[in-house]
Image: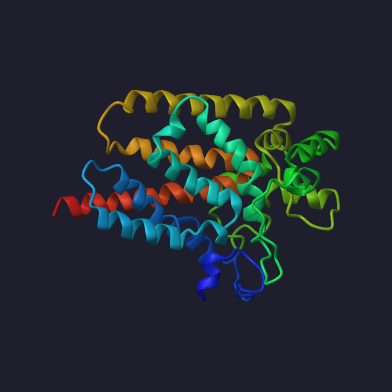
Amino acid sequence: FNIYSMLIRGGEFKESNQDTSSSLMLVITQVVRPISMIVLFYYLMTPKRNKIILSILFLLAVLTCFPLGMPRFFAAALYIPLLLITIPYMRKGNNFSLIFVLSLLVIFPFLNSFRDFDRDTKIDLAPDFDMFTTGHFDSYQNFALIILEDIVTWGNQLLGVLLFWLPRTVWPDKPIGSGAYLAHQMNFSFDNVSANYFAEGYINFGFFGVFLFIIILAYFTARMDKLYWQNVTKLDNNLFKVIYYIMLGMLFFVMRGDLLSSFAFTIGYLLAFYLVLKIVNSSSYR
């Protein structure tokens, strides 16, 4: 371990002997790492806040969840809720949509510079329109490819999503992510490709799966929106707001895919929230 492992996503400054696929690293990444940020969310929702405590929690959250030291989807899932909680302006009208588009043009390529960071890496905040011609936006192309090749697993990929927690030592043939599955089916030279939410529907149940997945997502988001607006005018420390903002951040990851990794990260994030809530509740009874 070194400090660069937390601050830089990859490159010559990061330790090369880390096994990021091990069970321990997955637990640390998906459950332990978000705890500091969720504690900050919780404290921001309390009506009475101490500035010193808030500053300490903020520094701990940023240090342990440094945006340059994690994949862009995870950074978005963590920092979108933080921005929505701390900046009310973003929750008004179309402000969030406009800021999101601006972030896509500026912050998105900026964070990508730290994927393989070294001394010669040039950091530029200017919009990089070349990214639209590279693999950063392969999601819908892969969706079209899945339809063109008629790749349907009849629920096997979905079963792997629901049983993501089951070790491969127990289930050696457990499905891999749908993007990687597509890459293997097409004999790509690499398998780090995406499969968006609609592609997940097709790869599981064909065109019926696309409509089924849309209905499920529409129902879930409508339900969450309804509960949010029913609770938004209540106490400032209403914890459902935290859950809502967390799920809003993770929604971008779920839509981008693949579903196996996004679902696992979402469950890990919610588990971290549950652990924080249990600790806070247990301490309040003392």
Residue 124 figure quarter: bottom right
Q: Judge left or right: residue 50 versus residue 156.
A: left
Is residue 160 visible to us here?
no
Q: Residue 233: x percent and y percent? A: 30, 26
Q: Quadrant of the C terminus?
A: bottom left
Q: Judge left or right: residue 215 versus residue 249.
A: right
Q: Residue 148: x percent and y percent? A: 85, 34
Q: Judge left or right: residue 229 versus residue 28.
A: left
Front-lying residue, 62 or 122: 122
Q: Residue 281: x percent and y percent? A: 23, 49
Q: Residue 50: x percent and y percent? A: 23, 52
At a point 38% along the width and 49% down the height, the residue shown is: 273
The relative height of residue 98 versus residue 18 in the rendered view (above or below) is above
Front-lying residue, 56 or 65: 56
Residue 208 figure quarter: top right
Q: Judge left or right: residue 231 versus residue 222.
A: left
At a point 73% along the width and 41% down the height, the residue shown is: 139
Is residue 110 visible to us here?
yes
The relative height of residue 146 versus residue 260 in the rendered view (above or below) is above
